[in-house]
Image (cartoon, grey):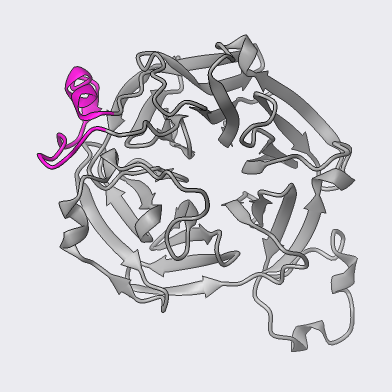
Amino acid sequence: MDHNIAVSFVHGYSDLDYEPNRESLPALWIMSPEGEKVYNFPFPRNVSDFETYKELLSGPSPMTSAKDFKKLPRFGLTGLSQNKTHLFAGSWNGVYQIRKSDYGLERIITNNLMNDLHGIYADDQQIITVLTGKDAVVISDFEGNVIDCFTVANDLSIHRDDRLGQIDWRFLSKQFRGATGLWHFNFVQRFDDEIWLTSRNTGAFVVVNLTTNKAYLRMMNQKTPVLLHDGVRHDDGLFYFTSIDGKILIASEALSKVYNPREEFEGVELFTRDLVCELIRLEDTELGREPNWCRGIACHNETMFVTIDGRYDTDLSFGVIGLDRKGKLLKQSRLKWADVGSEKDLRYVTGFDLVTF
């Protein structure tokens, strides 16, 4: 392997009152030409933790109305992004700025509009997170200051409401199953003046133009029911998506006929379509089975990497596989929790996101 893969993962416990060692918990799996290693990080959760770790935190202190969790939410790192020098990883209530040179934690960037972070985006100027339960997009600087915040309504109108910031969302926990929000935004990217968000509830992109202050949909001609999770644009100009039931979708405005011969028929241009999709079922690849979960996705040259398995109450492990477009299995690695921690109280461990560099 001539590159690095960073994989974020999360874990939770059967007893929601269980108190793990929050000073050092496994959360980042690095694969490199030199080998594989898991890195641990601190995970402040309650109001008092923010005082304990104040030297590590960049952003406003907890609001006076903030209260400790009745039941602690999951631990670990979620969405990943990067610039030339750092990895940026979401958590429940902050974004971790991690050096690529040694994978040391520089700081946790936080503000009261960060809650149950899913996908995140970071460049050299800003961080974009999503308050998924309120369909809100939050743009912050690296000191945790909120630059902009807006919600996307079900009619695609954009709204800015200061009342959203009157709550300290960092200390609110979701204790019910299923999607939050109307759209349930999972993955976020920025291209010039547009923010692209994957919507699990609609199986489409919601695109927000920051110049016109308008949103629109990018639809896909899906050939089977899907539950989109992540959707990343690769250097080849195509979008690569995961569906949590073990599928990869590859979409573009005009897919190559080499990969999708059904596109080669007379009159195809007469039909109204947006993004055309190619479908890869993981059970039909050399993996040979349908994983019980499929979430993160990243591409390096011609290889697609995805995280698989790790659903609640299954084997306490998850995997990363690398595939080519024809389904050939190029890489397969597995992280077993028994290799990094005690299995006694754990309910699940699952890969969340991954990036290559």
Number of dots carrying numbers: 0
Left or right, 200 with reference to 319: left
The reply to whether residue 227 is visible in this rendering is yes
Residue name at image x 65 percent, y 75 percent: 274
Q: Nearer the viewer, residue 200 or 34?
A: 200
Residue 337, placed above or below residue 167: above
Residue 198 included in the magenta stretch of the image: no
Residue name at image x 63 percent, y 10 percent: 339
Give coordinates of residue 72: x percent, y percent: 37, 31
The reply to whether residue 354 is visible in this rendering is no
- The quarter in which the N terminus is drawn is top right
Q: Nearer the viewer, residue 151 or 312?
A: 312
- The quarter in which the C terminus is drawn is top right
Give coordinates of residue 157: x percent, y percent: 35, 76
Q: Nearer the viewer, residue 297 or 41?
A: 41
On the image, which quarter does residue 320 sit in? top right
Residue 226, placed above or below residue 83: below
Residue name at image x 32 percent, y 37 percent: 93
Residue 57 included in the magenta stretch of the image: yes
Give coordinates of residue 81: x percent, y percent: 47, 39
Q: Residue furthest left?
A: 64
Give coordinates of residue 19: x percent, y percent: 38, 18
Left or right, 17 with reference to 307: left
Left or right, 274 with reference to 69: right
Residue 35, placed above or below residue 265: above
Magenta residues span 46-68
On the image, which quarter does residue 322 sit in? top right
Magenta region, main secondary structure: loop
Left or right, 85 with reference to 142: right
Residue 227, placed above or below residue 354: below
